Image: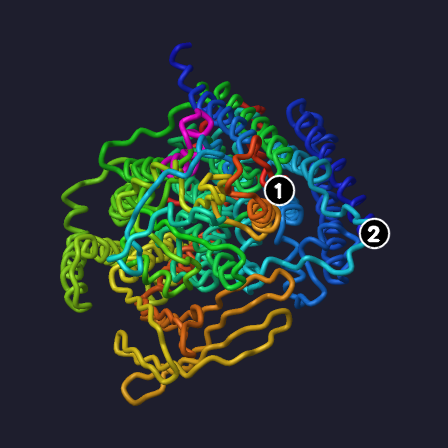
């Protein structure tokens, strides 16, 4: 009998895989509970991609609503959202800043030359340290940061037209109404981002 | 009215599928002749109804019936007719309908081409296929009905995703699905064999041509998909290890292992349990692929609409189908005999090694695909497994498989002589080593992996030639070399051709990854760039209007020396309905190189960013795939499948006369010695 147990191995393996698949169904790969939401964006000062002699800090953006988009030239999914970002920049509705994550600056620059540059400024996070501070799981990710420098939302994975129209832009409009001097008792949310 | 007819036809198809499954299997198990006789007509009736349903949906698409939700989601009145048809499988509901339609086509084919098989066996096979069909009909009818009405009707549709508006997408999914679904036949034969307890060489012979056909379609489907990604996505790559690509690649690896394992089971009676398991796995991975693509548990470039409810349904289907099969396997397999014995150096050993490598490779791809999901489910965070993992794991696994591929065919069954093999393959080894040195030298650049790639390619190709020459020399009688070559059995020629296809494929991959040249430039009108001996001159951008898009079309004149080679017109399109920008690369295809130009963004001063690639031998990748598929085609056209099945029938009759029933009758293949 014990010899015949081995014929059960494929079934047992399959059941384990199926259990994981079931668990996977109730998980949304795009939704990552982030401890960073509604917390101040971690500070960074990094070299600018286009001009390595200059630096850019997130503090330069206090008083403005902006997007921090984590990208890399090696990232396939970034190419998917890229045309949309380029379009957003052309419309000029919201400033997008790029965090070039674990990438060779020369390749990153070439990538922007080819696909168009949607960023006001891109900064170089060669070691990926700032990415760790921001709890970056995968590329691309996009943080929406308010006038007081608080992370209000993050989009995991490529931004689609849907996410843009139903979450990102409505939230940006809400954030632009906010007074940077007042600390809100409760952070406003947008339905499309839920 | 027409959509309702389609819906009704689909419901009838479900009812027939249930009858087909229950009555046929029960009849075969209980030995009721009249129940067994239901199997074939039921399969044919089911085919008629599902084709009717599919036709109704096609009609709705061609007629722009936007009162059907699915049509309104996928199509648009401005969409050209051919894309209206391919839009049927551009979304979830329609692709599932295509899936079941193909399943019915395969079932119908089994009913039609199995006149020489014992009736109870055919009934079991058709019954198992009916079970699978019934599951998928229920899935479609309960969770994803393509015939749902939209009230009030939409004025116009939301249009097909521009990425999918391409000739490649008209044929790629049908090919892929034919392959996916085709493995259901091998699966059903395996389950039927387990049910009847007759797991013998005859079973392997029956399954073989079906498996080969499915494998052939899958090979073409994957090749076409890769080609589509290459010219349509505008990134110049041909494989991205995306979850959806992996979902098609895993059944292919498993199916390739199955094709080889079936050969051993048929010829030598060995590896029976292993072969059955592979047949179950190949189809299970097809089902898993469907689940991964349709349930949204993984993020992918191919972002389809996802819905957890559907996910649960497919998962239940998966559990029932695969779980029951594996349980059946665990129950029946211990009683199966071991089959012919063989020595360490024998063709059996090489085929077993090939099997193990392919299965391990499929497992590695599965692990890489599911790993993000596993970690996530365990609460260990989200990660993405990228191409570096797959390349690091896959190349070292496949290199030995390709190496062994050359040796297997010249090795004798049961026991082979090592020295004899060395002396027969010495020329192949010599050619491989020489070409591994000469080719990088000729191309002008060295690297670590390049010589290995070239060596493997030439090793396999020359071993194929040696195998053919040896075989031709053995043919006695009159006739010249060529007529003797053509006179060889098609199944043998098919194997040689398929292996040669792998050599061509390896050549293409090695060449393009080693020697492609890529340049991104800012180009003003009149600017030129030279690459691989070709001069590309940018002659500006003009505006053009397509049927449902506006485009900026660049003009690039390519010259070599003083001769004009071609004019390339890459486009940047803006589709009107979905306002989605699309890059349409322009490619000049050649036997030894592709010239690939894609248009980037406008930059300051009327200049454009332009990306130019010089890709040596890139088309060999797809040509290799098609040669492999053609090998499969040759193999199934072998006359022995027709002759032998007749002989088999006589044997069955004789056996029935002796009163031998069911039971595991060990039969070593009699044919082909």
Q: Position of residue B313 (x, y in %)?
A: 63, 32
Q: Is residue B482 left or right of residue B650?
A: left
Residue A52 numbered tag? none
Q: Residue at x 19, y 46 (%)?
A: B421
Main secondary structure of the magenta stretch: helix
Q: How is the image coloured?
A: rainbow
Pointer 2 and pointer 1 on the same chain: no
Q: Position of residue A99 (x, y in %)?
A: 37, 49
Label 1 sits on residue:
A192
Residue B224 in magenta stretch: no
Residue under mark 2: which chain is it in? B
For the question of whether residue B92 can be seen, the reply is yes
- The answer to which of A168 and B669 lies nearer the viewer is A168
- The answer to which of A102 and B97 lies nearer the viewer is A102
Q: Position of residue B37 (x, y in %)?
A: 72, 35
- The answer to which of B165 and B262 lies nearer the viewer is B165
Q: Which residues are magenta?
A: B362-381
Q: Residue at x 43, y 46 (%)?
A: A62
Q: Position of residue B221 (x, y in %)?
A: 49, 54
- The answer to which of B516 and B177 lies nearer the viewer is B516
Question: Which quarter of the rendering shows the C terminus of chain B?
Answer: top left
Q: In the image, is residue B416 above or below residue B593?
A: above
Q: Give the CA separation, mark 2 to mark 1.
A: 25 Å
Label 2 sits on residue:
B152
Q: Residue at x 28, y 31 (%)?
A: B342
Label 1's element? Answer: helix
Marks 2, 1: nearer the viewer: 1
Residue under mark 1: which chain is it in? A
Q: How many marks?
A: 2
For the question of whether residue B362 can be seen, the reply is no
Q: In the image, is residue B227 above or below residue B292?
A: below
């Amino acid at each position: 009998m014990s010899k015949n147990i081995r014929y059960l191995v494929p079934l047992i393996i399959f059941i384990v895989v199926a259990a994981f698949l079931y668990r996977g169904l109730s998980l949304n790969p795009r939704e990552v509970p982030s401890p960073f939401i509604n917390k101040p964006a971690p500070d960074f000062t990094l070299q600018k991609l286009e001009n390595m002699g200059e630096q850019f800090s997130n503090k330069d953006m206090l008083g403005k609503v902006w997007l921090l988009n984590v990208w890399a030239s090696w990232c396939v999914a970034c190419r998917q959202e890229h045309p949309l970002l380029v379009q957003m920049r052309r419309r000029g509705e919201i400033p997008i800043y790029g965090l070039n994550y674990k990438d060779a600056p020369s390749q990153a620059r070439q990538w922007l030359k080819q696909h168009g540059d949607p960023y006001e400024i891109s900064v170089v996070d060669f070691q990926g340290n700032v990415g760790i501070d921001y709890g970056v799981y995968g590329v691309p990710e996009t943080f929406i940061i308010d006038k007081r420098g608080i992370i209000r939302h993050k989009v995991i994975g490529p931004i689609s037209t849907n996410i843009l129209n139903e979450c990102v832009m409505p939230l940006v409009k809400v954030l632009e109404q906010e007074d940077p001097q007042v600390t809100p008792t409760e952070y406003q949310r947008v339905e499309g981002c839920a | 009215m027409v959509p309702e007819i389609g819906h009704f036809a689909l419901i009838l198809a479900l009812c027939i599928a249930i009858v087909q499954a229950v009555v046929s299997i029960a009849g075969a198990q209980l030995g009721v002749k009249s129940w067994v006789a239901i199997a074939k007509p039921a399969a044919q009736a089911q085919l008629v109804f599902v084709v009717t349903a599919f036709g109704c949906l096609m009609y709705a698409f061609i007629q722009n019936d936007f009162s059907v939700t699915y049509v309104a989601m996928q199509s648009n009145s401005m969409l050209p007719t051919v894309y209206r048809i391919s839009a049927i499988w551009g979304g979830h509901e329609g692709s599932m309908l295509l899936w079941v339609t193909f399943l019915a086509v395969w079932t119908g084919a089994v009913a039609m081409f199995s006149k020489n098989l014992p009736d109870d066996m055919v009934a079991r096979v058709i019954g198992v296929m009916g079970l699978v069909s019934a599951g998928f009909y229920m899935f479609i009818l309960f969770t994803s009905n393509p015939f749902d009405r939209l009230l009030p009707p939409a004025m116009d549709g939301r249009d097909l995703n521009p990425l999918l508006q391409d000739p490649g997408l008209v044929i790629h999914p049908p090919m892929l699905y034919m392959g996916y679904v085709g493995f259901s036949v091998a699966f059903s034969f395996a389950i039927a064999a387990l049910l009847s307890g007759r797991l013998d060489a005859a079973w392997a012979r029956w399954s073989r041509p079906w498996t080969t056909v499915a494998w052939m379609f899958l090979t073409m489907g994957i090749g076409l998909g890769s080609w589509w990604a290459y010219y349509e996505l505008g990134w110049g790559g041909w494989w991205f290890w995306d979850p959806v690509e992996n979902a098609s690649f895993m059944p292919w690896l498993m199916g390739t292992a199955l094709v080889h394992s079936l050969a051993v089971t048929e010829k030598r009676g060995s590896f029976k349990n292993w072969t059955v398991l592979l047949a179950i796995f190949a189809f299970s991975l097809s089902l898993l692929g469907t689940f991964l693509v349709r349930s949204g548990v993984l993020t992918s470039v191919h972002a389809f609409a996802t819905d957890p409810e559907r996910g649960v349904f497919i998962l239940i289907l998966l559990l029932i189908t695969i779980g029951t099969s594996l349980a059946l396997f665990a129950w029946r397999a211990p009683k199966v005999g071991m089959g012919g014995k063989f020595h360490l150096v024998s063709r059996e050993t090489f085929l077993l090694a090939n099997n193990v490598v392919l299965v391990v490779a499929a497992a590695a791809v599965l692990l890489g695909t599911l790993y993000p999901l596993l970690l996530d489910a365990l609460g260990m965070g989200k990660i993405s497994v990228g191409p570096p993992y797959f390349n690091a794991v896959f190349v070292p696994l496949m290199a030995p498989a390709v190496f062994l591929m050359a040796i297997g065919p010249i090795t004798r069954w049961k026991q082979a002589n090592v020295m004899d093999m060395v002396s027969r393959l010495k020329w192949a080894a010599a050619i491989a080593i020489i070409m591994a040195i000469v080719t990088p030298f000729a191309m002008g650049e060295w690297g670590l992996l390049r010589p290995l790639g070239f060596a493997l390619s030439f090793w396999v190709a020359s071993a194929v030639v040696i195998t053919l020459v040896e075989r031709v020399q053995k043919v006695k009688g009159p006739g010249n070399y060529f007529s003797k070559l053509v006179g060889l059995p098609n199944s043998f020629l098919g194997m040689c051709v398929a292996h040669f296809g792998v050599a061509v494929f390896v050549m293409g991959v090695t060449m393009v990854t080693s020697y492609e040249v890529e340049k991104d430039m800012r180009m003003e009108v009149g600017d030129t760039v030279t690459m691989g001996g070709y001069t590309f001159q940018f002659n500006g951008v003009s505006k053009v209007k397509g049927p449902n898009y506006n485009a900026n079309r660049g003009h690039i004149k390519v010259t070599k020396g003083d001769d004009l080679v071609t004019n390339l017109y890459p486009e940047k399109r803006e589709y009107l309905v979905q306002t989605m920008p699309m890059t349409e690369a322009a490619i000049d295809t050649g036997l030894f190189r592709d010239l690939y130009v894609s248009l980037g963004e406008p930059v300051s001063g009327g200049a454009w960013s332009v990306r130019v690639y010089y890709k040596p031998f890139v088309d060999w990748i797809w040509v290799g795939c098609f040669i492999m598929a053609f090998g499969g085609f040759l193999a199934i056209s072998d006359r022995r499948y027709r002759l032998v099945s007749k002989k088999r029938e006589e044997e069955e009759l004789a056996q029935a006369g002796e009163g031998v029933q069911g039971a595991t009758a060990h039969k070593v293949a009699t044919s082909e010695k």
